[in-house]
Amino acid sequence: MVARAYTVAFQGVDARLVEVQCAVSPGLPAFSVVGLPDKAVSEARDRVRAALASMAIALPSKRITINLSPADLPKEGSHFDLPIALALLAALDIVPADATEGVVALGELSLDGSLIPVLGALPAAMAAAEAECGLLCPQASGAEAAWVGAAQVIGAPSLADVVRHFTGQCPIVPAEPGEVKSPPLDRDLRDVKGQERAKRALEIAAAGRHHLMLVGAPGSGKSMLAARIPGILPPLTAPEALETSMIQSLCGLLDEGGINRARPFREPHHTASMAAIVGGGRNAKPGEISLAHNGVLFMDEFPEFSRAVLETLRQPIETGEIMVARANAHVKYPCKFMLVAAANPCKCGDLTDPARACARVPACGQDYMGRISGPLMDRFDLRLEVPPVAFTDLDLPPAGDSSATVAARVAAARQVQADRFDGAAGLRQNADAEGAKLEDIATPDADGRDLLIRAAERFGLSARGYHRVLRVARTIADLDHSGDVRRPHVAEALSFRLTNAA
C-alpha cells in the first residue's frame, strides 16, 4: 500500500502542491527519498528516523521509499520533514491513512521529535486554502499561517502531538492569527526646518506612488526627509498586507506570526550586490526591491551604487515585477515599490557653493551625475533640488503641517484612486495607469494640454516623460479634490520634472 501526505515546494512567493508518497515493501532495509530532493530534503530521513525513535517507534526491516511528486520539480528546504514523517506513519498504520487527506503539512523535525518553525508558512497556507485543504505546521508558525482565514491551521509542538491529534487522543485547537503590529512612528515632518517645496514633493510622491529623486548638498536634509515618508503613507490594505507578508515570510522577517500593516521602508547600503538588490543567490531569494513591495525603497548616495545594479532597476520600475533567472530556477517576485533616491550634486558635494567648490566645476558634477543613465533618470516622476538650510531657519520653531496632517491628505487621495481603479486588475495608484486608462483619467483641459505640449517641445520630453507628467498632474488634482486635471496641476507637475536635477 502506498500512503500519501501533502506539502508544498516554493517557487518565489508561489507554493506548488507536492504529493509525498511512501511505500514500505519487502527487501533489504533501506530508506530512500526520490523526486529531485536537495541535500536538506535528502537528510530528512535521518531526522525522521531519530524523531520516531524518540517516540519508541522502530522502523521495520524493509525497504522504505519516499517519492516527492511531481518528480521533475526541484524540492528544497527542511520543511519536507513533517510530511515525510506523516506519510511514513500512515504507511505503518500508526495514523489513519485518510487522516492525511485534505491536509498540507510542513515543518522541520528536531531529533527529539519537536517541530521547528520554517520559512514560508504564509504562502503555504495560501496554497492550502486554494486547494481547499487545512494546514499542519509547527506551533511557532501557526500564528503566521492563521492569517489566511480560508484554511484551518493546526500548529503542533511535536510529532507526538501530531500523532495524538490524528488518532483522536488529544485534538489540537486551531491556531489564531498573530497580533497586527503598527510600530510607533517617532519621525515627524515638522522636525524638518524649511524645505517646504521638498515636503510638497514628498506628499505628491506618497499620494500617487511616484518615484522621487532628491539632489542637494551634504547636510541639506535629503535623508531626513526620506526617513519621514513612512509617517505619511497610509497603512497597508488587507490584500497588500498579505502580499507583503508572503515575501517577508520567505525571508523569515515576520516576528512571532504578526502581520505588520506599516508599509515597508527598505534602505540598502550602496555597497549592496545585485543579488541583494534584485534577488538571487543559490535559492533565488527575493531582494530589496521585492521586500519593498507596496512600500518604499530608499537608495541614499544613488550614484555610488554600481552601474550594473542601477541599470537592473529599469525594468522592475516599469513592470512591477522581477524575474530572477538562475541555472536551476526561474522565479518571479512582485516589486511595486516607490523609489526614493538621494544624491549629492557632485563628488565633493559643493557644486552649488562657489566658495567651497573644487577646481573641476562644473565637470565634476557632470561626471558624478553621469553615473545615472538617461533612461534611468527618465523613470523618476519628480526630480527636486534640495537647497542647504539657512542657519537662521534652524532656530525657528517647528512650522508646516505635521506628518499626521499630511498623512490624512495622502490617505484621502489614495482612497480616490482606490475608487477610481476598483475592479481594474493591477491598478491601485495613479503610477500604475497607462495607455487608454491614463488618457481617460488624466487628460488635462485645453489650457493644461497646451502648456504640456509646449513644454514637451521646448524641453524635449520623451514619451515616457510626457506620460509621467500626466500621472503626477492627476495625483496633484486628487490632492486638490479636483475631478479634472487643469493647467495649475500640469504646471506644478512640470515644475518637479524640468529642474537642473534632470
Image: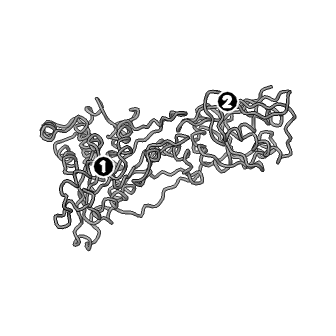
Residue at 59% x, 51% y: name it.
257
Q: Position of residue 249 (x, y in %)?
A: 55, 46
Q: Position of residue 481 (x, y in %)?
A: 26, 46
Residue at 68% x, 35% y: name it.
103
Asked whether residue 265 appears in the rendered view, the answer is: no
Badge 1: few (under 14), some or many (20 or more) residues near its Cα, within 10 Å? Answer: many
Using the image, determine if residue 431 lies above or below residue 235.
above
Q: Count every numbered label the image shows and give the total.
A: 2
Q: Which residue is mark 2?
A: 35
Badge 2: few (under 14), some or many (20 or more) residues near its Cα, within 10 Å? Answer: some
Q: Quadrant of the N terminus?
A: top right
The residue type indicated by label 1 comes to Leu
Specify the farthest residue to the bottom: 395
Specify the farthest residue to the top: 1
Asked whether residue 497 appears in the rendered view, the answer is: yes
* Frontmost residue, 177 versus 68: 68
Q: Position of residue 363 (x, y in %)?
A: 19, 53
Q: Could you tell me which secondary element the residue under label 1 belongs to? A: strand
Q: Which residue is mark 1?
A: 212
As drawn, the label of residue 116 is none
Occupied quadrant, residue 416: top left
Display colour scheme: one colour
The residue type indicated by label 2 comes to Gly
Which of the two marks, 2 or 1, is nearer to us in this view? 2
Image-based side of 391 in relation to 52, left or right? left
Occupied quadrant, residue 186: bottom left
Query: Reading the chain from its start, which is encountered first: label 2 or label 1?
Result: 2
Residue at 83% x, 45% y: name it.
53
